[in-house]
Image (tube, helix red, strand yellow):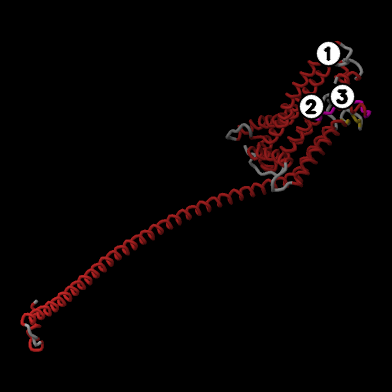
């Protein structure tokens, strides 16, 4: 790690800032019309990996004795399916596959965080890419994009399962119920306000939770890498910090295995809960 | 860290992936899983059935063994009875035969004794006659005295 960091020109601040910079493609004027190519490409590669593996196993799936591979896929599918059945009581073709996609895809995206922090950027530099930030879930665009998709699905589920009448009526009558016309009129704005806040908070908390965890994780990997920044075998400090870096990096990586799995699970579980809440009547 | 177009791309990519998973992955794998579940359930039911049948067969076999054993015991009983019976009969027959033989031999002995006695008396009569003729020094007219002699012989 330290060897690769050495060639990143400048000091510690520049090293960190360099690591947190996306490979950007400006497609138009203004700060919005930019595509983070690294995020998108890594995501697409992981999607291809996910679909390739799972679709292949689905095509080869037999009702007979499953191979190790099919057994693994079925184990994941079975776990997700069971969770959905326990939580979501309506019938929906989408929610279980959606949950599976969320869990596996976010897990894969998070897993990129466990690749040594300088390895892929170094490969990128060798290939002529100046910036490369490889963890898609450490990019707010990814997490917000997913949580907004989930948000739209929540609204769609609400409309579909309750019908438009009840869906819009509930905006004004829940969570506070009263009897009498005057009370209803008085509480309608309050209910609407609460409903809007509730709906807005969900995608934001969903995306920020995942983003925050992964961003912090990535940052700590970078900080651990900084321990021996610019060091070489001729520097005494490298001998002092090298072992420390090894131990700390190992510890954080091991801990991070839990974090990435847990975050993927939380995102999936909250999506299931939100969708089932949207489908149920108050 | 700015929000940009990537947001929409990522959202769409995610949703498209979910749709593909829903359309091309989920039904296949669930069908396979459910098929296997059904197969396993059928297999377990068949095993249960086979076990019940085995239990029935075992019970039947035990019953049959019991019946056969009872029948065998009865046959042995009957055979023993018959043997005893035959033995008794043989013993009785033997005793009867013994008695009969004994009676026959007794009769024979008695007859022989009677014959011997008769012979003896006849000889004694002759002897007496011979003695008497010797005493009388003359021939006794056998014909004349036949009646007397025979009476004498019968008395002896």
| Image point (86%, 22%), residue name | A19
Q: Residue furthest left?
A: B136
Q: Where is residue A274? Give x, y as percent.
A: 68, 35
**Residues indicated by labels 2 and 3 sit on the same polypeptide chain:** yes
Quadrant assignment, res A246? top right
Q: Which residue is mark 3?
A: A21
Kindly identify which residue carries mark 1.
A239
The secondary structure type at the circle numbered 3 is loop
Q: Quadrant of residue A9?
A: top right
What label does residue A114 carry, if any? 2
Q: Of marks 3 and 1, which one's residue comes earlier in the chain?
A: 3
Near mark 2 (Cα within 10 A), the count class, few <14, some 14-19 or many ≥20, is some
The answer to whether the residue labelled 2 contacts the one labelled 1, judged by CB atoms less than 8 Å apart, is no
Label 3: how many Cα within 10 Å (few below 14, some 14–19, many 20+)? some
Specify whether B36 is left or right of A109: left
Q: Is residue B93 visible?
A: yes
Give the label on residue B27, or none.
none
- The answer to which image quadrant residue A220 occupies is top right
The image shows residue B34 at horizontal and vertical percentages of 66, 47
Left or right placement of residue B29 versus residue A89 in this view: right
- The front one of B48 and B138 is B138
Q: Residue furthest front?
A: B137
Chain identifier of the residue bearing label 2 in the image: A
Q: CA distance from mark 2 to mark 1?
A: 24 Å
**Closer to the eye: label 2 or 3:** 2
Asked if marks 3 and 1 touch (Cβ < 8 Å), the reply is: no
Q: CA distance from mark 2 to mark 3?
A: 18 Å
- Residue A69: give x, y in percent of width and height: 74, 40
Residue B8 % position (x, y): 82, 35
């Amino acid at each position: 790690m330290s060897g690769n960091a050495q060639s990143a020109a400048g000091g510690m601040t520049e090293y960190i800032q360099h690591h947190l910079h996306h490979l950007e493609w400006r497609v138009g004027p203004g700060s919005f019309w930019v595509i983070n190519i690294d995020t998108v490409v890594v995501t697409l590669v992981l999607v291809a990996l996910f679909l390739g593996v799972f679709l292949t196993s689905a095509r080869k799936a037999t009702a007979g004795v499953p191979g190790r591979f099919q057994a693994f896929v079925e184990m994941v599918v079975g776990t997700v399916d069971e969770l959905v059945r326990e939580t979501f009581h309506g019938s929906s073709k989408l929610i279980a596959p959606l949950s599976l996609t969320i869990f596996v895809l976010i897990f894969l995206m998070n897993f990129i965080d466990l690749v040594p922090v300088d390895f892929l950027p170094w490969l990128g530099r060798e290939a002529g890419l100046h910036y490369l930030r490889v963890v898609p879930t450490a990019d707010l665009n990814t997490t917000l994009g997913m949580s907004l998709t989930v948000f739209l699905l929540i609204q769609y589920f609400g409309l579909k399962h309750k019908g438009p009448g009840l869906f819009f009526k509930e905006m004004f009558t829940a969570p506070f119920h009263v009897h009498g016309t005057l009370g209803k009129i008085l509480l309608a704005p309050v209910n609407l306000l609460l409903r809007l806040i509730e709906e807005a908070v969900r995608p934001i908390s969903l995306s920020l939770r995942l983003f925050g965890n992964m961003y912090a994780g990535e940052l700590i990997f970078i900080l651990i890498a900084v321990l021996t920044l610019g060091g070489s075998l001729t520097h005494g400090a490298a001998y002092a910090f090298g072992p420390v870096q090894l131990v700390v990096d190992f510890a954080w990586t091991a801990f991070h295995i839990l974090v990435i799995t847990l975050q993927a699970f939380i995102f999936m579980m909250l999506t299931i809960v939100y969708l089932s809440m949207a489908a149920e009547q108050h | 860290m700015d929000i940009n177009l990537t947001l929409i791309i990522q959202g769409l990519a995610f949703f498209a992936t979910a749709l593909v998973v829903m359309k091309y992955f989920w039904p296949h794998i669930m069908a396979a899983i459910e098929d296997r579940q059904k197969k396993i359930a059928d297999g377990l039911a068949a095993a249960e059935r086979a076990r019940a049948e085995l239990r029935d067969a075992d019970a039947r076999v035990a019953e049959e063994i019991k019946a056969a054993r009872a029948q065998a015991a009865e046959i042995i009983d009957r055979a023993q009875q018959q043997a005893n019976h035959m033995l008794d009969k043989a013993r009785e027959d033997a005793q009867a035969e013994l008695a009969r033989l004994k009676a026959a031999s007794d009769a024979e002995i008695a007859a022989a004794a009677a014959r011997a006695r008769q012979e003896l008396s006849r000889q004694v009569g002759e002897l007496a006659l011979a003695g008497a003729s010797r005493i009388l020094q003359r021939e006794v007219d056998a014909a004349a005295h036949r009646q007397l002699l025979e009476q004498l012989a019968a008395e002896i």
